[in-house]
Amino acid sequence: MSTWILLLLVALYFLYTRSAQGSTTSQLIGTTCPELTGLKIVKGQPVNVRQGRVVVEFWATWCPPCRTSIPHLTQLAKKYGISMIGVTNETDEAAIKAFVDGQRDKMDYTVAMDRTLAVSNGLMKASGLRGIPCAFIIEHGVIVWHGYVMQPEFEERLAVPLGAPPQEKTDTTAPPSGPYCDDKACYM
Ligand SMILES: *[C@@H]1O[C@H](CO)[C@@H](O)[C@H](O)[C@H]1NC(C)=O
């Protein structure tokens, strides 16, 4: 086998293992977050991904690391004043409700069922991420980070002060320079 093929295989291996982790960037970073459609809210208020900083987290009742991270998510939402939504693709509404009610104020953020899978498809599937609990941070409507919720990078990003929303593009046509006249007046 030539050295080049060997190098290529090594490179592919690294690419593969990197993409299997949660925090590596995908093509979704920097893109507009799709509207959260088709959700059935189980607890709390709907969130608006177009406004401020929002966390969309994917979890399931059967996932031990998801259950472990619930109090951590609640704490982060409170500490940084972030609107957060935990989305599950499970379908047994009674079981989900019972679980969420049982968590009481340990799970103090919006929880929703992804009935149509539109949100999972638009974020999890589109990013190629498979592991949960997985969070997406959205700022002013743009996806800026995704990864596992227990990674220090998650909180590090939440701790960064949220910048102002990008300005609407204003009329950039430069005013005519120098004195000029239209049919009403002359301008200096
Ligand atoms: C639901 O989510 C889990 C965890 O991400 C995933 O493995 C599974 O394929 C999803 N089910 C559907 C129907 O999308």
Image: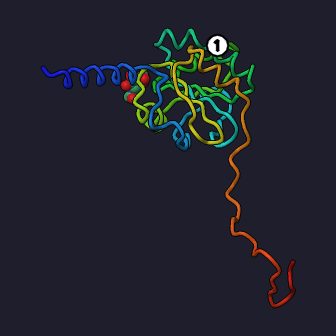
| Identity of the residue drawn at 68% across and 47% down | 166
Q: Is residue 119 above or below residue 154?
A: below
- Tally the numbered discs: 1
| Identity of the residue drawn at 67% across and 28% down | 44
Q: Is residue 105 above or below residue 58?
A: above
Percent coordinates x, y for residue 59 in the rendering: 51, 20
What element does badge 1 sit on? Answer: helix
Residue farthest toward the left in the current orientation of the protein: 1
Residue farthest toward the bottom in the current orientation of the protein: 183
Is 175 placed left or right of 110 in the picture? right
Ligand 1 position by quadrant = top left
Task: Tell me the residue that label 1 is attached to.
Answer: 72
Colour scheme in use: rainbow
User: Which of the 4 image quadrants contains residue 7?
Assistant: top left
- Residue type, numbered disc 1: His
Image quarter (top left, top right, bottom left or bottom right) of the N terminus: top left
| Identity of the residue drawn at 55% across and 39% down | 36
